């Protein structure tokens, strides 16, 4: 049986190949080719939003596919940019909107915005990664959460950044081994607990972040596997199988030492 841990390791051990397989899928290749052939000729926010294929592609690339209906909202985000402190995107706790502005920064670069690498290959790379995460999530949501956290965490600078994004918060709660009810606690108390238990500065170290996600996937597997929990009760286990033991077991399945 493939576990959350082994799936995550198989994908990340050769992420380039994993992404290439996604890029070669006919529908992904078709939409990417269209985007690359058209985006460079777009000069304004209005022109960008008028082409539904470009618009939907860019929003999906930034994990905002579910917001495609909110065109007035997205228009305001792109029109105001994120340079000024009072810009709309700056007021939103969700960093994905600022990421969208960084990719398509009409407010800063005007008609030259779409000539930037960030608007072209930058967006197509994000689209491939987003598609990969969505596809693996159909089989195991834990793998999708791990890949998403690994991608987003390096930009997080405080516990509040983790709490502002429900997916990041879910991974955090799993790592802390606290129940979902933890989310209902006072926000400052949650932040203090996270600060005490998790070194957020380590997120910028790819090796440390990868190890953290290995721990998360092991804990996630134990959390979702009732059989594992029932077996532990026979041995007097009260808080679940240790992440270190799960990592050892899963490494054996992968042929590791």
Image: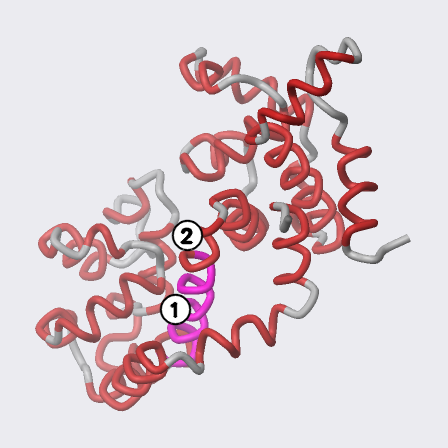
Residue ID at (44%, 82%):
24
SS of the residue at dot 2? helix
Q: Position of residue 188 (x, y in %)?
A: 49, 16
Q: Which mark is residue 171?
A: none
Observer-nearest residue: 144 or 35? 144
User: Which image quarter: residue 44?
Assistant: bottom left
User: Which image quarter: residue 37?
Assistant: bottom left
Q: Which mark is residue 127?
A: 1
How crowded pointer 1 is (Cα within 10 Å; few <14, some 14-19, many 20+) is rated as: many
Residue that mark 2 sits on: 138
Residue ID at (63%, 24%):
176
Observer-nearest residue: 154 or 80? 154
Q: Position of residue 222 (x, y in %)?
A: 64, 30
Q: What scheme was used to colour the molecule?
A: secondary structure
Q: Position of residue 165 (x, y in %)?
A: 41, 37
Q: Which residues are magenta?
A: 120-133
User: Which image quarter: residue 31?
Assistant: bottom left
Residue 202 falls inside the magenta stretch: no
Q: Earlier in the sequence, mark 2 or mark 1?
A: 1
SS of the residue at dot 1? helix
């Amino acid at each position: 049986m493939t576990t959350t841990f082994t799936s995550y390791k198989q994908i990340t051990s050769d992420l380039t190949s994993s992404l290439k397989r996604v890029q070669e899928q006919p529908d992904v290749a078709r939409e990417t080719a269209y985007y690359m052939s058209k985006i460079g000729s777009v000069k304004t926010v209005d022109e960008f939003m008028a082409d539904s294929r470009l618009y939907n592609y860019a929003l999906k690339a930034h994990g905002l596919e579910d917001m495609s209906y909110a065109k007035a909202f997205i228009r305001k985000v792109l029109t105001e940019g994120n340079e000024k402190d009072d810009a709309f995107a700056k007021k939103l706790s969700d960093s994905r909107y600022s990421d969208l502005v960084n990719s398509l920064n009409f407010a800063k670069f005007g008609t030259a915005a779409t000539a930037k690498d960030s608007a072209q290959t930058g967006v197509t790379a994000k689209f491939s990664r987003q598609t990969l995460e969505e596809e693996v999530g159909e089989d195991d949501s834990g793998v999708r959460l791990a890949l998403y956290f690994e991608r987003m965490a390096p930009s997080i600078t405080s516990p509040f950044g983790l709490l502002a994004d429900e997916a990041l918060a879910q991974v955090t709660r799993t790592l802390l081994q606290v129940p979902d009810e933890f989310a209902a606690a006072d926000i400052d108390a949650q932040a203090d607990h996270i600060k005490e238990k998790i070194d957020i500065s380590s997120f910028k170290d790819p090796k440390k972040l990868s190890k953290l996600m290995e721990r998360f996937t092991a804990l996630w597997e134990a959390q979702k596997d009732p059989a594992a929990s029932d077996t532990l009760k026979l041995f007097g286990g009260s808080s679940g199988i240790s992440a270190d033991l799960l990592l050892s077991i899963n490494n054996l399945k992968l042929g590791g030492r």
